[in-house]
Image: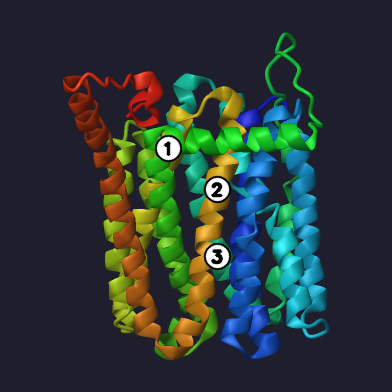
Amino acid sequence: MHTRHPFRSFLTGATMARLGDEMSGPALLLAGLAATGSVSSAACLLAGLTVSAAVGGPVLGALLDRAGRPGHLLAWALVLYAGALAALLAGLGRLPLVALVLIAVLAGLLGPALSGGWTAQLPRVLPAARLPRGTALDAMTYDAAGLIGPACAGALAGLAGASSGVLVAAVLICAAFPCAWTLPTRGGPTAPRIPSRPGTRQLLGDVGAGFRALVRTRSLARATVTSVICCAGSGMLITCAPLLGTRSLGSAGLGTALLSVAAATALTANALLARRPSMPSPDAVLCWSALALAAGCLLAATGRPALLVTAMAVAGLAEGPQLTALFAIRHREAPERLRGRIFTTGASLKITGSALGAGVAGPLAEWSLPGTLVAAAGCHLAAVLAFAWITTARRRRSAASHRSRNTGLAVSPGDDPVLRSRS
């Protein structure tokens, strides 16, 4: 089935892996809260699981770009990630917090395999003409997982205990193994062979090339910075969800279920985009969605049940198109030889942004829950300002180049990475 219908297999595996991923965060928060009785300790576990992605993502991307069979590498990464979740579950209440955070950090190195590493393989299973629709459908797997995952984590916590969600998440991630294993190979029979086991110097050079591509291509740099700052704000909102449920709805589990409201509206928005893949400029969508996310956080800060639901709906309507726009920009700008690095590095930076937001939100929420949500809104507004600053950077460079030509000191586009990049 997988070889005859590669895109169907791609979506099936992506959905299972991402469902497990979306369950693991809320489930780990609930399990950590039940085991330690401390919001900040539970937030530390989630932050540990995500913060190390900044290191793991670029390295994983470099290896994927070299692998003749990138699906095999992804498959083993999924198994190791699921095994780490099981180790965390076994250690809760038995190991000190420092040891649990260390396990979470090691697991987080493989986190980008569930997101950017998988999405980077999309052009290998679809022709270019079908890529826009495929991008929207790929983004829908995140939305579907976000819709079902937190709700399942909350339901399982109420029915079978707080730790059960972590176990089910690990099983789902392992279930994606066959779909990852059968992803198409890189290139064809005539494609140049690149050593899949590079030395340390070669690997560092590959990682550096991915970062340079993200920095020097203006659209990629703008999309990456904007999405990472937005993820910090979203990480703060996710961490606040159990407390919002406790204080406004009477149950921490209902708080995690609020995240499903956001996922439902995100799924709806991306379903519409999949039917009409000729979306507005993805760059513009990226900016406007950040403004909508800021509005959603401010609504959530009121703490009123009806406004909480509205806030999550607004956040979902923004997050769904924002993710599709981000993928569209990366597919548009990423060279084939750097595709894996650009996707996994971008994903790892987003995961790290979310981790930093979650880490800050834990102790901050114990001091003031509304203040934390206002700070989350501030992150999204900062993303808008960053988008505007990078957008105007080209104009500033162009003006500087014009002044240099007038004084006889010409700057050629080939010497300036901003002028050289595509808009």
Element type where label 1 sits in the image = helix
Q: State whether residue 257 is above or below residue 115.
A: below
Quarter-of-image position of residue 133:
top left
Q: Mark 3 packing: few (<14 Cα in 10 Å), some, or many (20+)?
A: many
Residue lying at the far top of the rendered structure:
190
Image coordinates of residue 109 in percent, x first then y, are 70, 54
In three-dimensional space, the C-alpha distance between marks 1 and 3, rounded to whole angstroms, equals 21 Å
Image coordinates of residue 393 in percent, x first then y, are 28, 39
Residue type at mark 1: give it.
Leu
Residue named by callout 2: 347
Disc 1 versus disc 2: nearer the observer: 1
Q: State whether residue 381 is above or below residue 307.
A: above
Query: Where residue 355 is drawn, which disc sits there?
Result: 3
Q: State whether residue 128 is above or below residue 316.
A: above
Q: Considering only order in the chain, which callout, 2 or 3, is on the residue closer to the N terminus?
A: 2
Image coordinates of residue 366 in percent, x first then y, are 48, 88
Query: Where residue 75 is drawn, which disc sits there?
Result: none
Task: State the residue at coordinates (59%, 61%).
Answer: 22
Task: State the residue at coordinates (35%, 31%).
Answer: 418
Q: Is residue 335 left or right of residue 293?
A: right
State if disc 2 and disc 3 touch (CB < 8 Å): no
Residue named by callout 1: 220
Residue type at mark 2: give it.
Ala
